[in-house]
Image (cartoon, rainbow, N blue to C red):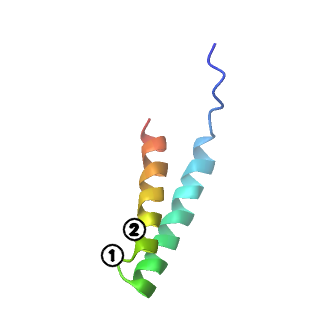
Amino acid sequence: MNNQIIEPKYKLTKDIQVKKKEMIELGNRYGLTDRRTVKCSQQLDHLLNRLAN
């Protein structure tokens, strides 16, 4: 049996919404190529990949 804890989809969806808002705010404040915006974008990508799998 797989011991991996499955994250509830609704929590993951909420986390994605929060991260997306954060990324937009960072992009508006620092620009789209700023390291903080890019890092946040990568974190959002990770969350989206988890939702897709």
Looking at this view, name the residue that lies furthest to the left: 33
Is label 1 in a helix, a strand or a loop?
A: loop
Mark 2 and mark 1: span between their CA atoms? 6 Å
- Residue 52 is situated, as x and y percent measured from the top left of the image, at 42, 40
**The C terminus, quarter of image:** top left
Looking at this view, name the residue that lies furthest to the top: 1
The residue positioned 48% from the left and 43% from the top of the image is: 51
Which is more toward the observer, 34 or 51? 34
Q: Amino acid at mark 2?
A: Val
Is label 2 in a helix, a strand or a loop?
A: helix
- Cβ atoms at labels 2 and 1 below 8 Å apart: yes
The residue positioned 42% from the left and 58% from the top of the image is: 42
The residue positioned 41% from the left and 72% from the top of the image is: 35
**The N terminus, quarter of image:** top right
| Residue position for label 1 | 33
| Residue position for label 2 | 38
